[in-house]
Image (cartoon, rainbow, N blue to C red):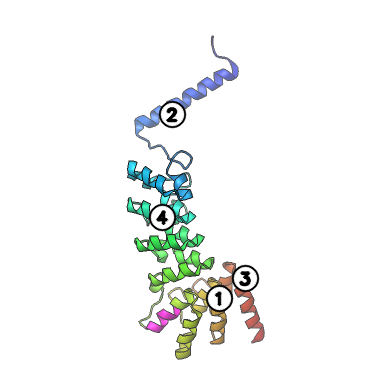
Amino acid sequence: MPCTGAASVRFVMVGLVLAAQSLSALCGKPQRTTMANHPIFAPTFHGDVATVRRLLKEDSTIVTVRDAKNLTPLHVAASRGQSRVAQLLIDHGANVHGPTAADKWTPLVFASYRGHYKVAKVLVDNGAGVTADAGNPIHYSGQRKHKEICRLLVEHGAIDGLVKSGDADVLDLFRAAYSYETGMVNEILTRRPELVDFKDKNGRTPLHEACTHGDTKTVRALLKCGADVTIRDANGETPADRAESHNQHAVTKVIDKHNASV
């Protein structure tokens, strides 16, 4: 019996889909693997080490598959704080440097943003980039006040390239400002008060960075040491502007109170 009406339309549509799939196969066009249909993502998400290990033993190349958001299993492990799974994936060849396509987030950026210190350490210990040209993970850990991750990244040289000076105290001052190390800031500026407004290559002072990271304690210490709140960086932003643009409202109040008192 000939097809009519809706049945005919469905028949034609199915035929078109099958034809397209056949043409794709003939042309060698790769089929996209998504989280919905690849078995590696669910156990990675939930930290099921045994299942991930079994799947990798069957086919280690699955460390390179990407989901519908262009994330690899290592991105997912980093985002979820699954440090044991992350190490397992790396041991099987996962790329610790691999960015997503759209926003260039590396696995370390995900871990830094989410505050997963153990995963961040696994990634750093396995050579993940920590600097601005590697996704600038300290920007994300600092914005969300993940202090231990900031310290980890600073220890591995995250901000060293920003400071153009052969003076060890200058570098230590910026490291302290990025790391919520108020005591170190005070110690350096007690000896070297002239460094309080030293600028990095982006024109930012230690006060800019403490404001960006929402470190009210260090901000107060820098203000007490005479830090200039009016200095603008290469983008024309004052320390208060940096605090505001990074939603560090507690710091904004500290700056406002300081300005009202002078």
Give the Cα distance between marks 4 and 3.
Answer: 36 Å
Give, as a single range, the part of the protein colored magenta. 167-174
Instruction: Return the disc, 1 or 4, that comes first in the chain's sequence.
Output: 4
| One can see residue 204 in this view | no
Q: Is residue 13 above or below residue 85?
A: above
Which amino acid type is marked by label 2?
A: Ala
Q: Closer to the observer: label 1 or label 4? A: 4
Local crowd at mark 2 within 10 Å, few (<14), some, or many (≥20)? few
Discs 2/4, front: 4
Instruction: Please tell me which residue lies in front, 251 or 120.
Output: 120
Q: Which residue is mark 2?
A: 20
Find the distance from the CA under tag 1 to the CA under tag 2. 57 Å
**Which amino acid does the dot numbered 3 rest on?**
His
Mark-to-mark CA distance, 1 and 4: 39 Å
The label shown at residue 249 is: 3
Gap in angstroms between the C-alphas marked 2 and 3: 54 Å
Quickly name the residue at label 1: 239
Query: Between residues 6 and 140, which one lies in front from this camera angle?
Result: 140
Q: Earlier in the sequence, mark 4 or mark 3?
A: 4
Disc number placed over residue 84 in the picture, else none: 4
Q: Residue at x 55, y 74 (%)?
A: 215
* Amino acid type shown at disc 1: Pro
Q: Are marks 3 and 1 in contact (CB under 8 Å)?
A: no
Q: Is residue 234 left or right of residue 28?
A: right
- Secondary structure type for disc 1: helix
Instruction: From this view, report whether residue 256 is shown above or below residue 88.
Output: below
Rendered location of residue 63, percent (x, y):
37, 47
Which SS does the magenta portion mostly show?
A: helix
User: Is residue 131 something one can see in this rendering?
Assistant: yes
Residue at horizontal 47%, vertical 74%? 179
Q: N-terminal of the two: label 3 or label 1?
A: 1
Q: Could you tell which of marks 2 and 3 lies nearer the N-terminus?
A: 2
